[in-house]
Image (spheres, coloured by chain):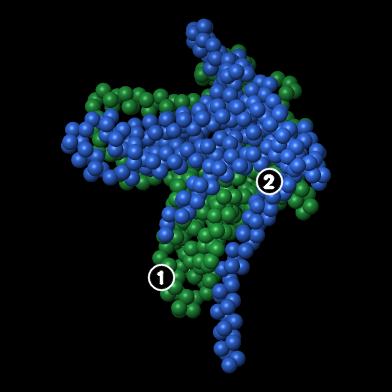
Chain colours: A blue, B green
Amino acid sequence: MARSTAIDMRTRLQEWIPKIVLAPSVATTLIFVYGFILFTVYLSFTNSKILPTYGWVGWHNYWRLFQLPMWSVALENLAIFASLYIAICIAIGLGLAIFLDQKIRGEGMLRPIFLYPMALSFIVTGTAWKWLLDPGIGIEHTLHLWGWTSFHFTWIKDSNYAIYCVVLAAVWQTSGFVMAMFLAGLRGIDNEILKAAQMDGASNWNLYRRIIIPQLRPAFLSAFVILAHLAIKSYDLVVALTGGGPGWATQLPATFMYSYTFTRNEMGVGASSAVIMLMMIAAIMIPYLYAELKEPK
Amino acid sequence: MSAATPGNAVSTGRFTRVLIYVTLLIFALFYLLPLAVMLLNSVKPLSEITGGNMMALPKVWTIKPWLEAWSTAQIGVQPTGLRPYFINSIEIVVPAVVISTVLGALNGYVLTKWRFRGAQVLFGLMLFSCFIPFQIVLIPMARVLGLLGLAGTVPGLILVHVVYGIGFTTLYFRNYYAAFPTELVRAAQIDGAGFFRIFWRILLPLSGPIIVVSVIWQFTNIWNDFLFGSSFAGQASQPITVALNNLVQSSTGVKAYNVHFAGAIYAALPTLVVYIVSGRFFVRGLMAGSVKG
């Protein structure tokens, strides 16, 4: 009798161990992620300035946020930055992947060269490009010294074009990664289908347009989701490359949030901008993650 | 990425092939240029940079910028060089990587081999936490670190990186263990092996590759972090990315570009070395973070 209860206890303990092991991670996620999200959402409805305060002001902060010219600039910049960044990364990534997939000698050398920027910090990338793009000392200066004195490349100093410099540096950093995603997709395509289509006299152009690229749909989707979420979160690169300037020319929602919360002491407005950022990410990631998790049944 | 089948069955003409090689080489130059220029100019005296051509080889080779960036350059108000911040980064990264990987491995094991009702929902919640814009947690995190007495400290930053890293490490191990035959685990259970024994004796010995992937991913992410470092670190606990930014952005005095470049390379070196030594796993980590493993 005593023995069977001991066994019983042991099995019950065994049943509980997995849950006990998982508990700390679940608890920290619930508190530090979802609890914190709720707290920030709450703050966005309060009159918090330098520190959190709890005076309820309703939608006032959101109303004020969308009146602020700097927020409009940040949203506009995000639209320009995100669309160009995603489109160019996908174009370069797909192009390089298709080219690398043509039995290229030295592929093993080229692939890591295309991909290494992804291992660097955006602060390092920003430092390097800030200098290359600086007209007085970087690319423009060099081309002048080489005799092309009419060459002008002053985008980083020009508030109409500075955002394109951010695009350039961000594309440099991430396009190799997109290449790796597409290359993995290409390597997964069945060669028999290609051989058959070639036998039927399909040109290379048609082969890619009609057969290969349509099969890369999952890679396109993943690339889009990852790049879009990186674009919305972009912060370090802007800080290192332009500091948000000249003027407000390269402000993005992430830099806006930081400056309103921690330097302008408008925590309520800062919190509301963070909530908008979260909603943008959620709109992209939740359907994607849901589909990814659902599939394996 | 499977290197097993390089190239496809598409055949191309000679002219197209030349075009392809030229394009690939141009892009290789594009990716290499910034790093090469930084390296080249970090071994030049400053006068050769401001007065000369960035693409030219140094007339006078010098390692002074490297020494200066390491131990004497002005960072913020202190002329300490990057060394103390490099050490801070190591002190933050090593425990954060170890703890988040261990937790990720155990979570992945539970979520695949000891499934219970609601496990999928919990995993979904942890997974989404990888992708949130961290701006949404900055304000409460600053408060909580203050309440815990960890504001501006290395342990505080370790905590932050563990908390926001376990989503990814759990994802890696979960996907890896999902492919592992559950029958083996059940058989061991019938033989009387307990939870930890099965993990230790059966799963862990076969987890080498995914541990490497997880460690590399966490190492790269945490080493390169800037947002948490600049939000939560104190003067004495700043990671190298924050210190590098302070060095480069300092507005006082002459801009010592050569010192900035040497500093940037110090900050880049650990992750670059990891990438060069184990690029294969690095790519696998990136891919697993974006598509189902």
Q: Residues within 10 Å of mark 2 (few under 14, many from 20)?
A: many
**Which of the chains bears the disc numbered 1?**
B
> Residue furthest toward the bottom?
A1
**In the image, A266: left or right of A145?**
right
Sequence order check, earlier mark of 2 and 1? 2
Say which quadrant the N terminus of chain A sits in: bottom right
**Image quarter hosting the C terminus of chain A:** bottom left
Q: Is residue B270 visible?
A: no
Residue nearest the viewer, comparing B43 with A245: A245
Q: Residue at x 65, y 56 (%)?
A: A30
Tell me the amino acid under the disc marked 2. Val
Query: Which residue: 60% across, 91% down?
Result: A2
Query: How far apart in space, not on screen, are marks 2 and 1 (Cα)?
Result: 41 Å
Q: Position of residue A294 (x, y in %)?
A: 46, 55
Q: Which residue is mark 2?
A: B137
| Residue at disc 2, secondary structure | helix
Q: Circle 1 is placed at which residue position?
A: B183
Residue A81 visible in the snapshot: yes
Q: Residue at x 53, y 42 (%)?
A: A284
Question: In the figure, residue B1 lies in which quadrant?
Answer: top left
> How many neighbours does mark 1 have within 10 angstroms: few (below 14), some (14-19), or many (20 or more)?
few
User: Do discs 2 and 1 share a chain?
Assistant: yes
- In the image, B279: left or right of B229? left
